[in-house]
Structure formats: structure tokens, C-alpha cells
Image: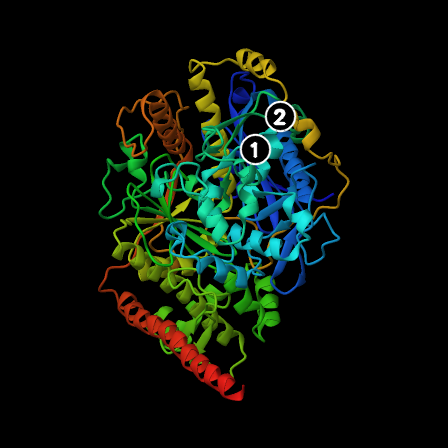
Amino acid sequence: MELKISSSGALPSENKLLSQNSLEDSQAKFYVGVDVGTGSTRACIINRFGKILSLAEKPIKREELRSNFITQSSKEIWDAVCHCVKVVVQESKVDPKNIHGIGFDATCSLVVVSATDLKEVAVGPDFSNNDQNVILWMDHRAMKETEEINSSGDKCLKYVGGQMSVEMDMPKIKWLKNNLETEIFKDCKFFNLPDYLTFKATGRENRSFSSAVCKQGFLPAGVEGSKPGWSEEFLNSIGLSELITNDFERLGGSLRDKRNFLSAGECIGFLDVKSACQLGLTHDCIVGSGIIDAYAGWVGTVAAKPGSAIPGLSENEDQNNDFDSAIGRLAAVAGTSTCHILLSKDPIFVHGIWGPYRDVLARNFWTAEGGQSCTGALLAHVIKTHPAFRELSQLADGASVSIFEYLNSMLETLVQKRNERSVVSLAKHFFFYGDYHGNRSPIADPNMRACIIGQSMDNSVEDLAVTYLGACEFISQQTRQIIEAMLKNGHRIDTIFMSGGQCRNGLLMRLLADCTGLPIMIPRYIDAAVVFGSAILGAAASEAFDLANEKTTSQTNRSCLSQKESVFDGSCQSIQNLPEGGQNLKNDVSPLYPTPTYISNTPAALNSHISPIVERPLHAVSSVKNDKDTSASTETGGLQKERRNRTDLLWKVMQELTGEAKVVNPNNKTHPDRILLDTKYQIFLDMAENQRKYRSMVDRVEVNLVNKSK
């Protein structure tokens, strides 16, 4: 069995395990994070200083029997979660009784089970295979259903950027109604994947605002006069009245039960006995409310402190112990796609930007989410489909560097060879628009496609390098387009906090800084920022539990409290048995990327604005002292205060554990590259607008021709 086990892969100093003295401290606190991505499951364990002690990864399969039908198995996912958690506990040599909290994040995929017996329900196109019961987020089968839902014009659509995306849950559920046998559909219960994981862990059906608000059309109390959260009017209008029965039981219930829906990292309860055994943890471990994976990236990055000065950023900005400090910090969580997540105190509506979502990250704060449907996938596609890909792979292997490092170095060489002013000017007459998979933000048009102006018949590696440069420029220019749409409508953005493997690409970070004009923060855990964010959720939930129980709950007291509770909701009967091992596991690392490292071996010119990181010890979280009332909720009294304190606690934990980050500052506005990129941005906008214009012209002709032929 081969399993990827490593530290976070950031700095050499971070690869060391906790000192022996700390490990021998029986009162030491540790926290586990779990991240279920598109292609793999990961787990990490952190100590009270925010140091990742061990990181494990296991691939998970996806099935695509028909184009745009992409499914997964919840059994396989939970099995992978259990394996990874056991591995990090074993490798870190941490006593499970000292692991106080666990947090979960996952892709916003739809899990379908039977309401009667909680067994998996096949989601098609092979309806005989119940093992395939997860519709992956990137599944685009429900295009027709999406259009029908959006034609309803319901008020809840106002809070998902004006229209639902085909990647959200309701179109997928409506597709299932249209294609499943009636009796089977009537028995279906639906989970967004993060909530399914916390259900498997605790046996409790608590749902997260992250899943319900962001992907299912749920409106928190008071938003548009909402009381139960779900809208009967909306569900009836889109033909899903079955979901209303028994107080919306098939969607997890309603707000009539105040405990049903939770913000990020709020305490659900203890691991149940069976899941604790499967995970290799104890029943005393607290489970935090789950979150969509991109939002865990926000949690794991935006409280980072800059390792060097950022022009215009106040030195005292990090001193607040509440979420006011997070305003203006845009998290760009990059992977196959990229999500752009931003917090605000008031609801701000932006066309093509999902949200505003209330209570998702913090009670009474609003979240906006922009996105690019393919960024990492775009770079991989551009490189792998070029005729020179095989030659490039051989050259990179021979130089013992990643493909991206080789291409970045080649671009520097081409500057000299072609007597160009800079790397950016190599593509001055090459115009690349890369919406191969439709546009998520800010155009919100799934029919957008890629186009290239300036392409020749050159099939050399040099041509591949320039094409790759054009793709990097497109990602950066589209990020600017998303940011400008947010700013135009009233958001504040001061800094971009990056995460994901793209952080290692010095060229891309430079282009992002220069296209947007904003400093780029690169966290200490570039590859593990998301799973690290989940561990922070576990830490926040554990701290919230301890504070609620006189702030100093000992392990003994915690055990007594957990033993007083019965196994939650009969969860041992509701969770399927899983094998303890025996599967052949392989690393799931893209060949385009090297073993995780910081930006290294890249040309000096690309790294000239990157500051070093200085690691410093962090103090353990003790208490939250903040009486400032930022609540806009209709709740009053003790419950309002309790929830405000929980919100402040999460930010405090984030500050304590996140640490410092590298900074990539943009060049001055008068720098030649900035001036050239500004000009090419106007061309980028023109290419997007003209594509839609040309499609509309052709569509009108086609409609007329069809009408004439009838």
C-alpha cells in the first residue's frame, strides 16, 4: 500500500515534528483537519502553534460514463477519510486522547441516500450502481433544469448572484426528480458533501450555512423575511414540492430547530463511538461544523500576517479580535478551478458573483464568492494538448525541475534570444481568452468558450512557452475583471491571499500582482491551506466547547460529559461498516507539479518582489474578550451574545494559528509591464464581449432559418 505521507511541504523548518518535550506533555492539544477535494482526500494534524505535524493524502476515483455526468462514491470517500486520519495520527505519534477537535471541508457535491435506511442511492447515468451516489460539483448534466429554475425569478436567486449555477444542488436534485423512478425519488435524502461528512462523524444531521446558503437557496433568518430558511414558494415554483414535507426533513430540517444550521467551526458535538473507532480517535473529540472546501481555504489563509511591509496596509490592522479585521481580504483558493471569497458587513449584490451569503463564515457577516471554472485545469489543458508537450516533459525531466519551472526559465531565455523588453512583452501580440469550460464570474455564462488571436503554425517548445504565458495572463486578467466587478459594487479589497499549488508559480504570482495592482499573500502552507483551514475549524469548535464549559474543561471532565450522552441519534445503525484497509493506494499528484516546495528554482526576476517568511511561536487560544456588537440578526439576549462570541472566537483562533506569509508586491503603476497589461486588459474585455455578440448574431440567424423551414 502506497500512501502519500508528508509534512506541509512549505519550509524545511516546518518538516520537523513537534519537540519530544512537547509530545510528552499530556495536556498538549492537537487538532485534525480533513479535506475532500475533487481527486483526493487529505488529512492533517496540527499542534497549538498551528504547525502541521503530518499530512496524508489518498486518491478518490470519479466516474464519467457520459460527457458531463461525473459521479463519486460516498463509501469510498469516507473510507479514504478514515485511512488518512489514522495515518496522520500514527505518523505524528500524537496520543489520540490529546486530539481535541476535528474539522471537515469538502467539494460542494451532492450526496444522495435513502431517507428510510440511509443507504446509497444511484444518481445515474447508471441507475443500477448504488455505489455511485455523489454528483460531483463539476457535473453539468442539469443545464435544462438550471434554466428552468432561473426562469422562476424567485427572490432567493438574488442571493446566488442573480441566478443559480449548474454546479449548485437544486438543479441536480431537479434532474434526479426528472430521471429517477418516482418512488425512489420520494425516498431520497440530500446532503451537500461537507454536511454528509459531519453526519458520518457524529450521527447528527446538523447542516452548515456554508452548504445550505451557498448551494441550495437557503435564506438565514430575517433575510427577505425568512423564518424557516427554506422557501416553500420557491420549491413549489421549481417543481420540488416533495422537499417541503415534514419540515423540509429531506434537506436537513429548518430553522425552527435553532441547532439545525451552524456557521463555520461551530460545535456540533462529540464523535460518535463508531466513527471514533473508524477514524482512530476518541469519543471525546469535538466535531466542528463543516464547510465547502474553498471556504476552508479562506479560513486557513486570510488571518496570516505579512512577513514584510505591504504598502498602504495599517500595522495595527491585525490587532482586532473580531471579523472586522477580515474586511478587504480576498481569498483566492486555487486548484482545478479558483474561488474568490470576500467578507463584508453588509449585503452587496454583484452580477455574476455568488452571494451575498449571510452567516456562512461568521454570524451576521456576508460572504461573496467569485470564481473561475478552470485555472489549474486550464494550464494543464494548454500544456498537455500542445504538440510539443512530450518534448517539454523530457526536457523538464532532464533538468530535474517541474514543467512550470522549466517553462518559466525558458521564457527568461527567450527574452534574451528575441531581444524583448521583458517576459510579459513576449506575448504582446498574442491574445488568449481561456473560458474553455464556460464563465462563472463575472459574466455568469456557461456557454462562453476559449479563443486565441495571434496563433501561428509553430509547434515548438518555444511556442508552447508563449502559449502558456498567454494562459497565465488570462487567469490574471480575469481575476482583475472579477475584482473590478466587486469593487464597482461597493466591496473593499486590499490584499489577495492565495493558496494552492499555483502559489509555487512565480510567473503567475507576478502577473496576478501586476494585473490587479494588489499585493499577493502566499501562506506558509501553500498546498495544505485548505486542510489546514479545516483543522482550524476543529480547534475553534473545541475551544468553543471548553469555553462553554467554564473554559478549563479537563480531559477527564470532557470524558465524563461525553459519556453522559447516548450515541447520537442511533448513529451506529446509520453508518455503514467500512473495511479497515487492504486497498492499493497511489499518490494523486499531478505530473505538472513537483513535490511540494515553496517558490524555488524560478528565475530571479520572477521572485524579485517576494519577501521571506519568518516563523514565530504563537500563543494558545485562551479566551475571547470583545464586547463589540456587530449583530444584525433578529435574535436577542443571551443567544445573540453567545453566537457573537463564537464568531469572535473563530477569528481569534485563526489569528493564533495561521502564522506569517510571503508577500508579492505589484510593480509601480508606471512600470512598462503594468502599462502593457493595462492595454491588453482592454483587449481581453473586448474579446469577451465580442464572443457573446457573435454568438447572438448567429443564434438570431439560426432561429430565423429554423422558422422559415417549418
Q: Residues within 10 Å of mark 2 (few under 14, many from 20)?
A: few
Mark 2: amino acid: Asp
Q: Give the Cα distance between marks 2 and 1.
A: 9 Å
Q: Are marks 2 and 1 in contact (CB under 8 Å)?
A: yes
Mark 1: amino acid: Glu
* Residue pointed to by mark 2: 569
The x and y percentages for residue 231 are 44, 44
Residue 629 to residue 384: above or below: above
Asked if residue 36 can be seen in this view, the reply is: no
The colour scheme of the drawn protein is rainbow
- Residue farthest to the right, as pictured: 582
The x and y percentages for residue 110 are 58, 48
Q: How many marks?
A: 2
Image point (57%, 74%), residue name: 388
Asked if residue 9 can be seen in this view, the reply is: yes
The x and y percentages for residue 245 are 55, 40
* Residue pointed to by mark 1: 205
Q: Secondary structure at mark 1?
A: loop
In the picture, the disc for residue 451 is none
Classify the position of the C terminus by image quarter: bottom right
In-image side of 396 versus 508 (left or right): right
- Residue 505 in which image quadrant: bottom left
Q: Residues within 10 Å of mark 1 (few under 14, many from 20)?
A: many
Q: Secondary structure at mark 2?
A: helix
Classify the position of the N terminus by image quarter: top right
In-image side of 53 versus 266 (left or right): right
The x and y percentages for residue 396 are 57, 64
Residue 460 to residue 657: above or below: below
Image point (40%, 66%), residue name: 473
Task: Answer with mark 2 or mark 1, whichever residue precedes in sequence.
Answer: 1
